[in-house]
Structures are given as structure tokens and as C-alpha cells.
């Protein structure tokens, strides 16, 4: 599981669906959830989790896309295996992992030091823990 520390900015609820917006390094991240614990409140710092296989990579990305979570990052390290590729991404404060196919990594010509955009769908993000400030 990859973890990202963020602060809750907003919670919108309709029926049992919640859309939670977070501040991560000045960027908005969004999460969809059917249930929220009582301790999940605006202003709280949280640890967000996502599976490395849910983190897509875009190189030289521009334009519009439906992924609400777009994180600019640098490739810290890359290990290309026979079928899969593990990519360690870093921002100014956070390091997290993406796992994509080796074929995609080669097609994108990914290498250490590349600047990329990590893409995470809102339904692939979850609150792992509410942190004490």
C-alpha cells in the first residue's frame, strides 16, 4: 500500500455517497466513499492509501482527463521485471509506488529522474488513518 499524508478540505455527502477533498502539497485530491468514520472531519490530517497497481503514470502529460487525482512526481527509482515494473515516485514531501506493466514502462521510455504525473482514480483512494495534528 502506498501512503500519502494530506489534510481534509471538504466533505460532500448525498444519500450515502461521500466525496472527500484533500489538500496534498497545495493540490486537491478526491476520494469517493460510501462510509466515513465520525473522526473524519474537515481540517483533520489523514494518511491516504492506495494500491501501487492503482497508480497510473503519464509522461509529458497535457490536456484534460477524468482522473481527479493528478500528482506531479519524479521517478526516484525504477525496477523493470519480465512482466511488471515497480516505480518509486517522489514529490517534495512524499514517496510512493506505482506498479505498471513492463511493456508500458518501456513504451514510455521511463527512467530514473523523469518527471511524470501519477494518476489515481477517486475510487482507488482511501483513508488509512486519521492522524493527530
Image: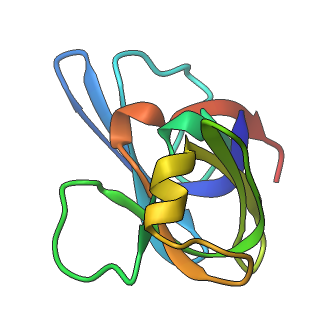
Circle count: 0
* Of residues 19 and 13, the one drawn nearer to the viewer in this rendering: 19
Note whether residue 50 is visible: no
Percent position of residue 13, x then y: 24, 31
Note whether residue 132 is visible: yes
Give me the residue at 57% from left, 48% from top: 102
Give me the residue at 83% from left, 45% from top: 132
Q: Is residue 82 left or right of residue 122?
A: right
Which corner quadrant of the image does residue 29 belong to? bottom left
Q: Is residue 99 left or right of residue 34?
A: right
* Of residues 56 and 50, the one drawn nearer to the viewer in this rendering: 56
Give me the residue at 53% from left, 59% from top: 105
Residue placed furthest toward the front: 82
In the rendered image of this protein, does residue 102 appear above or below residue 74?
above
Q: Quadrant of the C terminus?
A: bottom right
Q: Quadrant of the N terminus?
A: top right
* Of residues 13 and 47, the one drawn nearer to the viewer in this rendering: 47
Percent position of residue 106, x then y: 53, 62
- The colouring scheme, among rainbow, by chain, secondary structure or one colour, is rainbow
Percent position of residue 81, x then y: 72, 43
Q: Is residue 106 left or right of residue 87?
A: left
Percent position of residue 125, x then y: 49, 37
Which corner quadrant of the image does residue 108 belong to? bottom left
Give me the residue at 68% from left, 30% from top: 128
In the rendered image of this protein, does residue 113 appear above or below residue 118?
below
Amino acid at each position: 500500500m502506498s501512503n500519502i499524508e494530506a489534510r481534509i478540505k471538504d466533505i460532500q455527502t448525498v444519500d450515502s455517497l461521500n466525496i472527500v477533498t484533500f489538500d496534498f502539497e497545495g493540490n486537491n485530491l478526491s476520494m469517493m466513499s460510501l462510509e466515513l468514520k465520525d473522526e473524519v472531519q474537515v481540517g483533520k490530517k489523514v494518511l491516504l492509501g492506495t494500491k501501487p497497481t492503482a497508480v497510473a503514470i503519464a509522461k509529458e502529460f497535457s490536456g484534460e482527463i477524468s482522473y481527479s487525482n493528478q500528482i506531479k512526481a519524479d521517478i526516484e527509482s525504477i525496477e523493470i521485471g519480465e512482466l511488471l515494473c515497480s516505480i518509486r515516485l517522489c514529490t517534495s514531501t512524499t514517496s510512493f509506488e506505482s506498479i505498471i506493466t513492463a511493456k508500458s514502462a518501456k513504451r514510455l521510455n521511463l527512467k530514473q529522474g523523469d518527471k511524470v504525473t501519477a494518476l489515481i482514480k477517486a475510487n482507488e483512494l482511501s483513508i488509512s488513518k486519521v492522524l493527530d495534528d
